[in-house]
Image: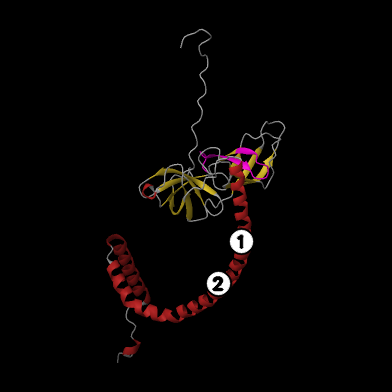
Amino acid sequence: MEYSPPPFFKRGPNLVTRLTLFSLLSLVLLFADARFRYMEDIRAVVGVILYPFQELVDTPARMARGMANYFSLQSTLRGENTRLREEAFVNAGLLQKQQDLIAENENLRELLHLRPRFEPSSQVASILYTARDPFVRQVVVDKGASDGVVPGAPVIDTLGLVGQVHRVYPWASEVVLITDKEQVIPVQVVRNGLRAVIFGLGYDGALEVRFMPVNADVEKGDLLVTSGIDGVYPSGLPVAFVDSVERNAAYPFARITCRPASGVRSYRHVMVLGTTEDYPERPVAPEQGGPGPGGKD
């Protein structure tokens, strides 16, 4: 009499056969999905069906995260509110002194018959993206000719000078950063008023003051601001801090490296300033070799 196991012990094909079969089926599905995109619709339908269950399962964890974020945010806001109140109290006193100094400065300029200080207009812009060329330091902002932006307009952030508008489009503008190798900015040392020229080096985080004598009164930590004598940048905008000063008697000039004062690569919002004041035209140099006595024009 032939013996056979009960029905619930029947195992069907062996493990190797099933492994081979399912492996081939997986490879066929992978190939069909990669080549013909047959599974995208199925995945979308499954995702729609499973979405309510995923949300239901994730609800307790999301509520716990929300409560933790709420209490953390409340604690952070309390600390920030306290700090801002203290800063506002300190800044109020500084503002009163500054208003007094501004009024005194204006009175002195009137007494000395000096030109009034120019206060440029400004507008906030957002950085959209950087330039595609990795060898230039440029960004594109969301303000253009329709917003009154003109080529050459200075661009600043909360810390100092960021760059200069290079090219203007109807609704966007290209801004060349001060670290670009083509940028040259007249500056002066705040500590002693010494004028200099600062150059971009073509990479982030570094600038260089060139053509300064080895005995120039420049020290590490000095703040350099725009001098305003180029007719492009308003005076007094922070540009850079001196990082190092190397003096070698064998060379006529000192090697002065600086770091930008502004967050050249740190922020998403900048401020585009209006054009600077209108200077009188430069005087024309007299022609050399004019007619001598008794000569004719």
Q: Is residue 297 above or below residue 112?
A: above
Question: In which quarter of the view is residue 37 placed?
Answer: bottom left
Amino acid bearing label 1: Asn
Residue drawn at 29 percent across, 60 percent down = 35
Task: Provide residue 248's location: percent of width, then percent of height.
Answer: 71, 35
Q: Circle 1 sits on which residue?
A: 91
Q: Earlier in the sequence, mark 2 or mark 1?
A: 2
Residue 89 left/right relative to 146: right
Residue range highlighted in magenta: 179-196
At label 1, counting other C-alpha atoms closer than 10 Å, the crowd grade (few under 14, some 14-19, many 20 or more) is few
Q: Where is 276 relative to 251, above or below? A: below
Farthest residue to the bottom: give it: 1
Residues at marks 2 and 1 touching, judged by CB atoms closer than 8 Å: no
Q: Which mark is residue 34?
A: none
Q: Residue furthest front?
A: 111
Can the viewer see residue 3? no
In the rendered image, residue 119, in percent from the top left (x then y), is placed at 51, 48
Which mark lies nearer to you, 2 or 1? 1
Q: Quadrant of the N terminus?
A: bottom left
What residue did someone put label 2 on? 77
Q: Which residue is nearer to you in this view: 274 or 272?
A: 274
Left or right: where does residue 272 sit relative to residue 24? right
Q: Which element type, helix, strand or loop, lies under badge 2? A: helix
